[in-house]
Image (spheres, grey):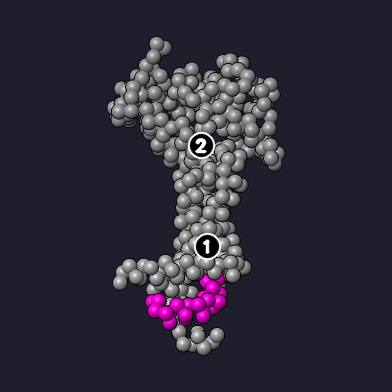
Amino acid sequence: MFVNRILQILSVIRVSLGSLPERAGTAIVATIGFAAVVLVFTGMLSIREGFARVVQQNGSPDVAMVMRGGSTAELNSSVSLEASRIIAQAAGVAKDDNGPIVSPEALLVVDAPRRSTGSDSNVPFRGVTTPGFIIHDKVRVIEGRMFAEGKGEVIVGRQAAAQFAGLEVGKELRWSGFLWRVVGVFEANGGLEESEIWTDAQTLQTAFDRGTYFQSAYVKLINVDAYHAFKDSVTTNPQLNVTVQRHDEYLQAQTELLSSFVSIAGGVIALLMGLGAILGAINAMYSAVSSRSLEIATLRARGFGRLPVLISVMAEAMVLGIVGGAIGGMIAWLAFDGFQSSTLNFASFSQVAFQFAVTPQLLVQGTALALLLGLLGGFFPALRAARLPIAAALRGH
C-alpha cells in the first residue's frame, strides 16, 4: 500500500512537471518573482558579509586591546603615555629583543574626497609605533616605501587609495595645517587596516596637538591563554582605568550595529517582495489547477488519491521556487560579489572600504527562502486541486 502510494505520487509529479511548457507564461512570471526576492535578499546581505569579512579579517585572539574604561571604540578612548608604560609591564605581555611588544596608537579621522562623488568622507588616520608592525603583522607595503618618522610622511591602505582621491604615492595633503606626503601604499590581507592612513604616532600627536595621549594600546600576548592573566593585571591596577578586550572580539563587536541594520532592512524588503512572489505563485498555481482540471479528474477516476494530487501541485510550485532562487542567486553573485564600495562604520563614524561578498551560505539561504515561498504559494491551489469534484470536472470537458 505504501509503495503504491509513493508510485502514485511520483507518477502525478512527473505528469505535472511534464505539462509545465503548456503553462510557460504563468510559470515564468512566478519564477521571476522568486528570482527577484532572492536577488534583493542576497544582494542586501552581501553588504553585511563583505563588511564583516573586512572588519574581522585580521582579528587575533593573542592580541589584546586596551582602551579607557567604559569606551566601546578607539575614537572615544584615551590612553596616556604613562598608562601605556604600565600596561607594558603587566603579566602575559610578549617580549622581543627590544622589550615588551606593546603599541600605543593614536587614531583620528580626516577628510578625503570620494572618487565616485567628490564629497568628503571621514577616513581613519592612525599613528603607530614600531611594535605596531609586529602586532599588525599582515601589513605589507606594496607600492612606494615605508614612512620615515618625524617627516610628515604617510602610507595609505590599498582600499582607501582606491576609494578616495588624492591618496596616490607622491601626493601631498594638508590636514590640521600640516603638510603630509604619501610615500607608500600597503595591503593587510584585505582587512580593516586597508581603509586607513598610517604615520608615526609622535608626528600625528604633534600635528593635531594630542600631547602624549593615544586612543588605545595594542598588546601582543605570550599566547592565547595569557589573556585572562593580562586582563586581571591591568584592570585591578589602581593606577589604571581601562577596559580590555581580545582584538578579534573587539572587531566583531564593531560589526554588530551595521549587521543588525542591514539584516533588518534586508528582511523587511524581502518580506514585502516575498508577499508579492507568493501572490504570483498562487495565481500561477491556480491557473495550473484550472488548466489541468480534466487531467486531475481523470487521474482521480483511475484510482489516484487526493494526496498525490496535492503533493504534485505543491511540488510544481516548489520547483518554480528552486529555479527562481537559483536564477536570483546567480544574478546576485555575478552582479554583487566583489563589488567595491565603502560605508560608514557606525562604531567609529569613519568610512570602511569593502567588497560585497555573496557567500555560498547566502546562496543556500536565498534558495531556501525561494523554496519556502514556493511552498506557501502552492499550498491553497494544491488544496483546491485535491478537493476538485471528479464528476463535475469530467462533465465540464
Is residue 349 magenta-colored?
A: no
Is residue 300 magenta-colored?
A: yes
Amino acid type for the residue under numbered disc 1:
Leu
Q: Residues within 10 Å of mark 1 (few under 14, many from 20)?
A: many
Residue located farthest toward the top when viewing the structure as drawn: 97
Q: Is residue 69 left or right of residue 324?
A: left
Foreground: 314 or 396?
396
Task: Provide the secondary structure element on which disc 2 rests.
Answer: helix
Return the mark for residue 320.
1
x, y percentage for residue 245? 38, 33
Q: Is residue 288 left or right of residue 59?
A: right
Magenta-colored segment: predominant secondary structure: helix
Q: Is residue 22 left or right of residue 246?
A: right
Asked if one can make out residue 73 in the rendered structure from this viewpoint, the answer is no
x, y percentage for residue 265? 52, 55
x, y percentage for residue 77? 46, 33
Foreground: 291 or 349?
291
The residue carrying mark 2 is 54
Vertical comparison of 23 with 294: above or below: above
Q: Nearer the viewer, mark 2 or mark 1?
A: 1
- The quadrant the C terminus occupies is bottom right
Which portion, as a residue range, is magenta?
A: 284-306
x, y percentage for residue 39? 56, 54
